Amino acid sequence: MTMSLPLIFLQLLLATVVAASQALPGCENRCGDINVPYPFGTRPGCFKDDNFLVTCNSSSNPPKLYLTTSLIEVTNIFLSGELRIQSWIAHDCYNKQHLRVVSNIPWMRFSKFPISHTRNKFIAVGCDSYAVIKGSQGRKYTTGCLSLCDSIDNVINGSCSGIGCCQSIIPKEVRSYNISVNSYDNHRSVWDFNPCSYSFVAEDNTYTFSSLDLADLQGRTSFPVVLDWAVGNETCVAARKNQTSFACKENSKCYNFDNGPGYRCNCSEGYEGNPYLSNGCQDIDECKISSPCNMTCHNLPGTYVCSCPEGYQGDGKKSGSGCSRIPSKSLPLINIALGISISISMLLLGGFWLYWGLRQRKISKLRKKFFEQNGGFMLQQKLPKRDESVQSSKRSGSAKSFEIYTEECLKKATNNYHESRILGQGGQATVYKGILPDDTPVAIKKPKMGDNSQVEQFVNEIAILSQIKHTNVVKLLGCCLETQVPLLVYEFVTNGTLYEHIHTKSRDASSITWENRLRIATETAGVLSLLHSDANRPIIHRDIKSNNILLDENFTAKVSDFGSSRLFPTDQKQVATFFQGTLGYLDPEYLYTNQLTEKSDVYSFGVLLVELLTGKEALSYDRPPKEISLALYFVSSLKEGRLLEIVDEQVLKEVKAETLKEFAIVAKGCLEIKGEERPTMMDVAMELQGLRMVEKHPWVTESNDAEEAQSLLGELSNASGGDGSSSISASYTS
Ligand SMILES: *[C@@H]1O[C@H](CO)[C@@H](O)[C@H](O)[C@H]1NC(C)=O
Ligand SMILES: *[C@@H]1O[C@H](CO)[C@@H](O)[C@H](O)[C@H]1NC(C)=O
Ligand SMILES: *[C@@H]1O[C@H](CO)[C@@H](O)[C@H](O)[C@H]1NC(C)=O
Ligand SMILES: *[C@@H]1O[C@H](CO)[C@@H](O)[C@H](O)[C@H]1NC(C)=O
Ligand SMILES: *[C@@H]1O[C@H](CO)[C@@H](O)[C@H](O)[C@H]1NC(C)=O
Ligand SMILES: *[C@@H]1O[C@H](CO)[C@@H](O)[C@H](O)[C@H]1NC(C)=O
Ligand SMILES: *[C@@H]1O[C@H](CO)[C@@H](O)[C@H](O)[C@H]1NC(C)=O
């Protein structure tokens, strides 16, 4: 019972996460009445690559959308991988004297997008006409059709079979066409009723031939044409190998494109939305939309379950056996033949038991799927196990696993959220110190008000923290689900934040020695490289800053705030941006790409290193304009050879200039403007570890003693998770 609570709760939370716009955040998702879903976009940063640029001319009325910067007008974009454009018509017209007066040979090129070979036809209209379509990009081909007739009475309305109208199909992989139409005899014998020939490509079923078209095509100037679109130029299998560039996001499936290279994405069954956006595929609430159950319906991510209340039986589905009352008297059987009835009831019992077993299994499978989807790995492993054990032996299990606290308990622990218990306060949450009944001190994060973003952050934080158990990551002890937005309960870290230690004068400034600074940096780097270590699903912290590094009594670093900056107390001086991250630490590339990557963490960490080195705040408007951003100030000082001028006085006293320089070089690497030029967090952790070793054993650079080196390597690889000793020896020799 206790444990099904978070399940249901998370489920509710997820249901409330609103369906997002179909475009990237901050991008227009409409042009007039036309939807512009990602990967399409109208300006840089909004489309996936140049092929998906569409241009909106909002000065025409209604606004018009064009493919790239061409004159090809787009009228619909469908996430199923199709888009509709307006195509032009080729004419060939003659006057009474049988001289050509108008002739045009329109052509269209669609760069990467082929014409749908299943949904369009090439059509010609006329009684003395032959039309040709040529493709040059993609498949090279030429084809056409011939249409003749003597009299208007011979043509057949609705039939396009060579009398007044002819058509041909379009092959696969055609990405451009030139169409032309011509006559054999300058319409000499048919001019009275048919002075022109026409040809065009049109979407199936948008054109039905009529004898009236022979006069002037009834004034039409364009026809709709359907193009296919896909992303990438490789198959699903190949594309999936690089998760960074793979276009199909959560809860979606990938399909190979059947009209050229590339692939398409589709939301998985039970989800709807934009599969190309992260979190674009949203759960469908089947219970609300189609009410498929006879009595009780539970919506779950990607699916739903029906159930029957007590006293009823059946699968609960309207389309199935529904729910029916369990008959109270099934005994008459016994009167007929006792022997038979016993075996029958045994059978029934067995069947019922089997049914329940399967059903339970199905439900627990769904739960699992659900947790996995939320990244609640650890929860998934832990909770179901406890689910069973808790009922039988209350809390007999391991010392401190994930707890569900009651609100009453936390109220007591914080003295009813008394002001004196406030540890920190941010824009959206307050952190209180609490004392649990067993005298354990804890930190309790209490959101100020509930909204969807907080719900997401809550899920995030649980999902991530429950995956990571590490001495340098703040421990999540449990949560309280009885409030509108849940409260999170953390271990209490005694010594405040790194920010306070570096920047607040009231703290004993000399307590944070260079050795401690270097260790804190190394420990933080270690945690980040661990977070990034899963190449397929790296965890990006997104908000590394000195405020989010907590310190215990031994100055051991504890990285915190995995929800997002907004939930943890931020110092008022540091502006929490409305998007992810904090100004002063924010990856400059983010401004162009709107995307935070592992390398964004590297950048933020670089700022943290500079903060440790200089004792200056990441962003301060008290400094002269050129020095407001610490990162820029640092990089320019380094370039001008003025590093030692900006180093913290106390650090300068403690450390050799050479070491500072090496440290500065690591920091500079992290602060490269281009993400790809920054080192990985693993590299950084290694280099810092190397620096620590040199600090501790200054002789190591001179010594070639194999045994000593060996033991050092051991020490290193223990500290860094056992991997990458080769890169350590590299940093030694360098
Ligand atoms: C936008 O449409 C208006 C009105 O149709 C036209 O005058 C203008 O040239 C168009 N602008 C662009 C950039 O195509
Ligand atoms: C199609 O027309 C364009 C523009 O006139 C021309 O450059 C191209 O060569 C033509 N392609 C074919 C296959 O005729
Ligand atoms: C075709 O249909 C139009 C009206 O839709 C009619 O005026 C015309 O006479 C018809 N032509 C023939 C050949 O049936
Ligand atoms: C696929 O696209 C990538 C980048 O868009 C390009 O570098 C590569 O050459 C393309 N491969 C093929 C086979 O077209
Ligand atoms: C994966 O894709 C990203 C973005 O397109 C690219 O920068 C990176 O080099 C690719 N990685 C590999 C291993 O191909
Ligand atoms: C994509 O998903 C929708 C809805 O689930 C489905 O109707 C459609 O057939 C799917 N498309 C493909 C190519 O499977
Ligand atoms: C659904 O439940 C109602 C009672 O609530 C019952 O009368 C009806 O027969 C059920 N329908 C099906 C399809 O089981």
Image (cartoon, rainbow, N blue to C red):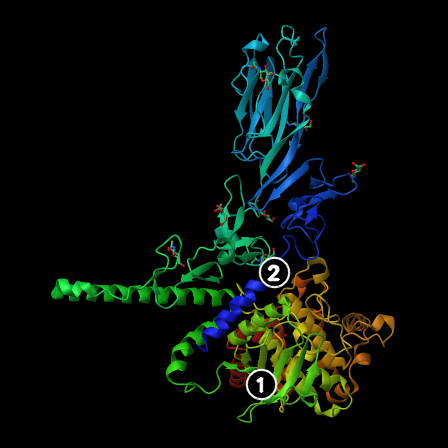
Crowding around mark 1 (Cα neighbors within 10 Å: few <14, some 14 to 19, many 20+) is: many
Q: Which residue is mark 2?
A: 18
Question: Residue 538: x percent and y percent?
Answer: 56, 67
Q: Residue 299 bears which disc, if any? A: none
| 57 displayed left or right of 409 | right
Q: Which residue is mark 1?
A: 410
User: Residue at 45% of width from left, 60% of height from top?
Assistant: 304
Crowding around mark 2 (Cα neighbors within 10 Å: few <14, some 14 to 19, many 20+) is: few
Note whether ligand 7 is within 8 Å of mark 1: no
The N terminus: image quadrant: bottom left
Q: Amino acid at mark 2?
A: Val
**Could you say whether the residue bearing mark 1 is in a helix, strand or loop?**
helix
Kindly indicate whether the residue at mark 2 contacts the one at mark 1 (C-beta within 8 angstroms): no
Q: Which quadrant of the structure image shows residue 55? A: top right
**Could you say whether the residue bearing mark 2 is in a helix, strand or loop?**
loop
Q: Which comes sooner in the sequence, label 1 or label 2?
A: 2
Question: Residue 392: x percent and y percent?
Answer: 37, 83
Q: Amino acid at mark 1?
A: Leu
Q: Nearer the viewer, residue 534 or 698?
A: 534
